[in-house]
Image: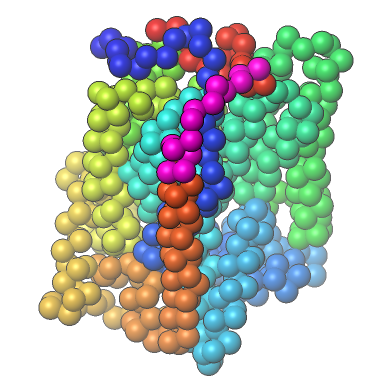
């Protein structure tokens, strides 16, 4: 397959990044996050989510221990010296969720009793809606920084947000979206360091990537990858300046790691206690890698089809083989290797290969170099639409655990893993699509689904996610208020959502007016002295 001929930039031409207005970026972020919030389920999806929610509630009260425990999962808690328990997960997700929890608490004041708790939960579980939208926005910035047109960058951001399993995962309270955000921010800072080395940028890069370890401890493995590529990027600097850059990166990474040890001491009584015991890493590596990419039920290529175009770009387009793409490739390899060695490489209960969500956005970075080609662009958009209809929308409409519960009931708890991962007859994507008509008919009231008898919602944390998985219903928070017998105060959360939509529209119109005025002005020659990147650094395109 030849390199796309209509990508005309010469390898020797420096790439001057276009300017993206604040209005454009803000309207994109607000618009994407508004869609995510509108279709959020407003509930936990696993015991992991529930523990993080309880930790968020405890943090709001400045308590290290959590109030509600699930006796079915004792290994997810750490016993403290005073007999209380703390959650075994890092504080990153709970820290980011605090403002959303606070909004939910305000809404719950207008309700009464236990039913008002639902408003607090719904708002808290908006967290990943905004985290994933922020990741898509940073991906747009990266695309423009690496030479894509504004339209091409917008396409990449939308393809990530709505054409991959990032969309349904924005409805969860998992920690992987948070790690993904820290990684794309790290890549963006590395691009800017390559253009203009700065000790402050290096420190910010180390600090932001290091903060990923507060979401998931194994994210600390990404730090040495960034450190190595930092040294490669600035290797031509004088020795003193190079050492200063390395030290700044290390000091930046040191800050969140110190915070991690300090909070461990506060929560567990020991700085070196990291929560849950280290997972086993004895699963065969080759088998795990094959499963992650080629198993019929968990292949990342099925749940994120645009990755196929990104991989093809690296293989067939030499322009895409730059240092920043190799950085992204190293992050992906690190993520794949550490996931493939886990016995639970599949990340159940989840939609798709949950742990590869961490590097999903950086997998799409090679698209930057081909997105403005007509033929490649059509291919990327086509794969994005396939991902939207097959790998994203079905799991957004119907809570994905509905299918997993069905699989457990019909194949047996001991066999459902093999069935849903390796048997095409139990492919989760096809199974989820089959549930959508029933969920829509139920929402319209034309055919009420006969529910398995449910325990009252909020009877205990172990039921908070199981409650929603008994039958197919449209999984939107504003449709769950009635079935959960929750306070109508939850609908107050529509107010900030509507204001956000109006603000996104206003900013979009402002950006269009500004762009129109810019088009009418005479084009000035752009001075590239400050943005030219040496070809060896590999930020711009390579030869074709």
Residue 526 belongs to magenta span: yes
Q: Quadrant of residue 477?
A: bottom left
Which residue does the image show at 35% across and 47% down from the upper left?
A: 162
Q: Nearer the viewer, residue 436 or 7?
A: 7
What kind of secondary structure does the magenta stretch mostly adopt?
A: loop
Which residue does the image show at 39% across and 86% down from the upper left?
A: 485
The residue stretch that appears in magenta: 516-529
User: Does residue 62 appear left or right of residue 383 in this picture?
Assistant: right
Looking at the picture, does residue 1 appear above or below residue 130? above
Q: Nearer the viewer, residue 399 or 133?
A: 133
Residue 219 belongs to magenta span: no
User: Does residue 63 appear left or right of residue 173 in this picture?
Assistant: right
Looking at the picture, does residue 100 appear above or below residue 450? above
Looking at the picture, does residue 148 appear above or below residue 156? above
Which residue does the image show at 64% across and 65% down from the upper left?
A: 98
Q: Is residue 294 visible?
A: no
> What is the x, y in percent for residue 475?
33, 67
The image quadrant where one finds the C terminus is: top left
The image quadrant where one finds the N terminus is: top left
Q: Quadrant of residue 64?
A: bottom right
> What is the x, y in percent for residue 94?
63, 60
């Amino acid at each position: 397959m030849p390199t796309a001929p209509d990508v005309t930039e010469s390898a020797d031409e420096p790439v001057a990044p276009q300017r993206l207005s604040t209005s454009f970026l803000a309207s994109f972020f607000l618009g994407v996050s508004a869609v995510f919030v509108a279709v959020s389920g407003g509930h936990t999806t696993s015991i992991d989510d529930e523990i993080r929610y309880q930790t968020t509630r405890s943090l709001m009260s400045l308590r290290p221990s959590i109030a509600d425990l699930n006796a079915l999962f004792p290994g997810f808690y750490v016993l403290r010296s005073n007999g209380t328990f703390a959650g075994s997960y890092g504080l990153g997700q709970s820290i980011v969720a605090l403002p959303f929890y606070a909004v939910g608490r305000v809404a719950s004041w207008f309700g009464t009793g236990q039913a008002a708790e639902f408003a607090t939960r719904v708002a808290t579980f908006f967290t990943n809606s905004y985290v994933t939208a922020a990741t898509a926005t940073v991906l747009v910035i990266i695309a423009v920084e690496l030479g894509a047109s504004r339209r091409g960058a917008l396409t990449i951001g939308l393809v990530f947000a709505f054409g991959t399993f990032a969309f349904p995962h924005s409805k969860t309270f998992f920690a992987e979206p948070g790690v993904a955000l820290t990684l794309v921010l790290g890549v963006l800072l590395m691009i800017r360091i390559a253009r203009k080395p700065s000790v402050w940028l290096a420190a910010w890069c180390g600090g932001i990537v290091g903060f990923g370890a507060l979401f998931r401890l194994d994210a600390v493995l990404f730090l040495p990858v960034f450190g190595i590529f930092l040294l490669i990027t600035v290797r031509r600097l004088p020795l003193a300046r190079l050492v200063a850059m390395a030290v700044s990166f290390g000091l930046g990474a040191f800050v969140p790691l110190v915070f991690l040890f300090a909070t461990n001491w506060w929560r567990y009584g020991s700085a070196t206690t990291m929560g849950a015991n280290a997972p086993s890493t004895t699963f065969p590596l080759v088998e795990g890698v094959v499963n992650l990419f080629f198993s019929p039920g968990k292949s990342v290529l099925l749940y994120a089809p645009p990755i196929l175009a990104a991989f093809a770009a690296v293989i067939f387009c030499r322009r895409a083989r730059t240092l920043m793409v190799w950085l992204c490739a190293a992050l992906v390899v690190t993520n794949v290797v550490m996931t493939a060695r886990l016995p639970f490489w599949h990340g159940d209960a989840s939609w798709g290969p949950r742990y590869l969500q961490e590097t999903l956005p950086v997998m799409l970075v090679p698209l930057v170099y081909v997105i403005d080609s007509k033929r490649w662009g059509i291919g990327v958009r086509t794969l994005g639409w396939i991902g939207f209809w097959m790998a994203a929308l079905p799991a957004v409409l119907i809570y994905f655990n509905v299918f997993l519960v069905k699989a457990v009931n019909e194949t047996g708890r001991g066999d459902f893993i093999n069935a849903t991962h390796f048997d095409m007859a139990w492919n989760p994507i096809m199974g989820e699509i089959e549930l959508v008509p029933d969920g829509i008919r139920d929402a319209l009231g034309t055919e009420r689904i006969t529910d398995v008898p449910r325990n009252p919602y909020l009877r205990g944390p172990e039921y908070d996610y199981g409650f929603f998985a008994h039958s197919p219903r449209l999984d939107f928070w504003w449709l769950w208020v009635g079935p959960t017998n929750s306070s109508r105060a939850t609908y107050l959360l529509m107010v900030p959502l509507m204001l956000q939509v109006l603000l996104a529209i206003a900013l979009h119109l402002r950006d269009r007016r500004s762009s129109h005025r810019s088009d009418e002005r005479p084009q000035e020659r752009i001075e590239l002295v400050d943005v030219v990147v040496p070809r060896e650094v590999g930020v711009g395109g390579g030869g074709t």
